[in-house]
Image: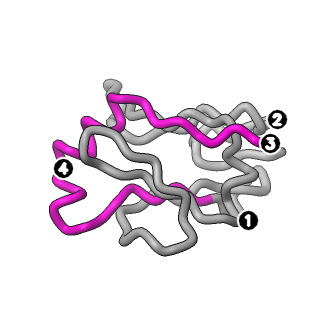
Amino acid sequence: MQLPPKVTPRAFARLAEIGANLDGKALRVAVEGGGCSGFQYEIALDIPKNDDLILEGGGEKVVVDAVSLPFLAGAVIDFSEELIGARFVIDNPNATSACGCGTSFSI
């Protein structure tokens, strides 16, 4: 059985700061074909769907669709603030290589 992805308290706190749940939305993390390394992450606020895996913390939600779930098994979803900007980041143990942009990877 595959481990589900995990979400850090910092990521849930950022969702609370931006008021994602006030509109009934969650952070959707999906994997799609494309990008410079073969796959890319799609991260957006979205309404949860019936077949999504829902990860909850601090009154906030992160959702992953069934197709993306195997690509994100054991991944850690976090929020990072650096001098170059702030963004949600994914530490994915399934990725064998990643692009410098941080959103494209290969398995």
Q: Secondary structure at mark 1?
A: strand
Q: Residue at x 36, y 52 (%)?
A: 61
Which residue was labeled with disc 3?
A: 1
Determine whether the residue tagged by mark 2 lies in a helix, strand or loop: loop
The span picked out in magenta is: 1-30
Q: Which mark is residue 96?
A: 2
Q: Earlier in the sequence, mark 2 or mark 3?
A: 3
Residue 51 location in percent, x, y? 57, 71
Tag 3: amino acid:
Met
Q: Is residue 68 left or right of residue 58?
A: right
Residue 22 drawn in magenta: yes
Residue 47 point in image, percent of width and height: 36, 71
Marks 4 and 2, how far apart in space?
Answer: 32 Å
| Residue in the picture at 57% in, 42% down | 101
- For the residue pair 48 and 98, the one nearer the viewer reads as 48
Q: Residues within 10 Å of mark 3 (few under 14, many from 20)?
A: few
Residue to which mark 4 is pinned: 18
Distance CA(mark 2)–CA(mark 3): 20 Å
Circle 4: element type: helix
Q: Say whether disc 4 or disc 2 marks the residue closer to the N-terminus.
A: 4
Look at the image and tell me in which quarter the N terminus lies: top right
- Left of 65 or right of it: where is 50? left
* Nearest to viewer (mark 2 / mark 3): 3
Calculate the distance from the C-alpha at mark 4 to the C-alpha at mark 3. 34 Å
Q: Is residue 8 magenta?
A: yes
Q: Pointer 2 and pointer 3: residues touching (CB < 8 Å)? A: no
Q: Which mark is residue 33?
A: 1
Which corner quadrant holds the C terminus? top right
Q: Quadrant of residue 99?
A: top right
Disc 4 marks which amino acid?
Ile
| Amino acid residing under circle 1 | Gly
